Amino acid sequence: MKVIGVIPARYGSTRFPGKPLALINGKPMVQRVYEQVIKSKELDKVVVATDHEDIKKVVEEFGGNVVMTKTDHETGSDRMAEVTTKVDGDFYVNIQGDEPLIRPELIDALVQAAKETPDTVVTAKTVLQNAEDAENPNVVKVVTDKNGLALYFSRSPIPYNRSGKEVTYYKHLGIYGYPKEIINEFVQLPASTLESLEVLEQLRLLENGYHIKVVETAYDAVGVDTPEDIGKVEKILGGVKHV
């Protein structure tokens, strides 16, 4: 199985235009993500998928692989599907381009799970440490069956704890691995009812009968959504904030 790691790096962002090029302790974020991802032992190749020449130039300057994609993709999955037509592989891992602290061990765990359960999409979850996040609609929750397959994803707290017993909530992490055939079938499907209600693309997979294997990890994503988040990441890295 030839495994390709894909880092989407879109230039346009409502809250943070040009985000992939934002400097984190003097180094572009896209480079920090790339350098973390290539530490993975399970990936055969890593590429940055971008829609902007400035990002392409930066990636080439630090020696990374880059693929130009269309500017009008509605979702990250659509961009991934285009990559499959340009980079040969059997399995593609979509790694968020705004997580400079991504752990290569998590990527390896996803690929290993994929090898054990072929023809299945894989993703990840982690225990919610902050109880308030269970009520936060910006934090997506997931519940799984006894075999680790996703039952449902929601912005609401799931399961609903009517019993009052102690409950563990799991946060869904936005990293996905797809067999080539499934990602290309997926993007051809119309938006589903639950997907439209929750605004969660992965529900389209569940509604159409696809299985999603969910790997548990201790890693909790630290994403960069706004310029203010740069300082948080720099603090974690232990460096001095770059001006």
Image: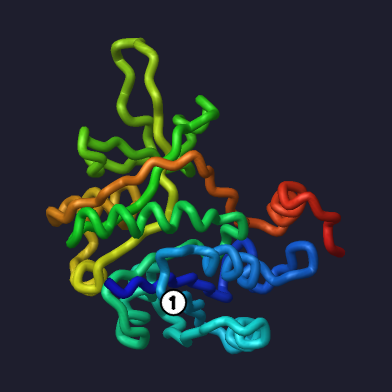
Q: Where is residue 203 in the image (x, y as percent from the top left)?
A: 26, 51
Q: Which image quarter holds the C terminus?
A: bottom right
Residue at (48, 71) in percent of width and height: 8
Mark 1 lies on a secondary structure that is: strand
Q: Where is residue 41 in the image (x, y as percent from the top left)?
A: 46, 64
Q: Is residue 4 left or right of residue 16?
A: left
Report how many numbered discs are placed on residues in the image: 1
The image quadrant that residue 21 belongs to is: bottom right
Residue 206 in view, yes or no: yes
Q: Judge whether 181 appears above or below 170 on screen.
A: below
Q: Where is residue 14 in the image (x, y as percent from the top left)?
A: 58, 65
Residue 17 in view, yes or no: no
Q: Is residue 81 left or right of residue 120?
A: right
Q: Which image quarter holds the N terminus?
A: bottom left
Specify the amino acid type for callout 1. Lys
Residue at (53, 43) in percent of width and height: 220
Q: Judge whether 105 appears above or below 91 on screen.
A: above
- 67 or 198, which lies in front? 67
Residue at (81, 54) in percent of width and height: 239
Residue at the disc numbered 1: 45
Q: Where is residue 66 in the image (x, y as percent from the top left)?
A: 51, 84
Residue at (62, 61) in percent of width and height: 15
- 231 or 61, which lies in front? 61
Q: Judge whether 205 appears above or below 33 on screen.
A: above
Q: Is residue 235 left or right of residue 33?
A: right
Structural crowding at the residue carrying mark 1, measured as other residues with C-alpha within 10 Å and reported as few (<14), some (14–19) or many (≥20): some
Colouring used for the render: rainbow
The image quadrant that residue 181 belongs to is: bottom left
- Outermost top residue: 164
- Outermost front residue: 41
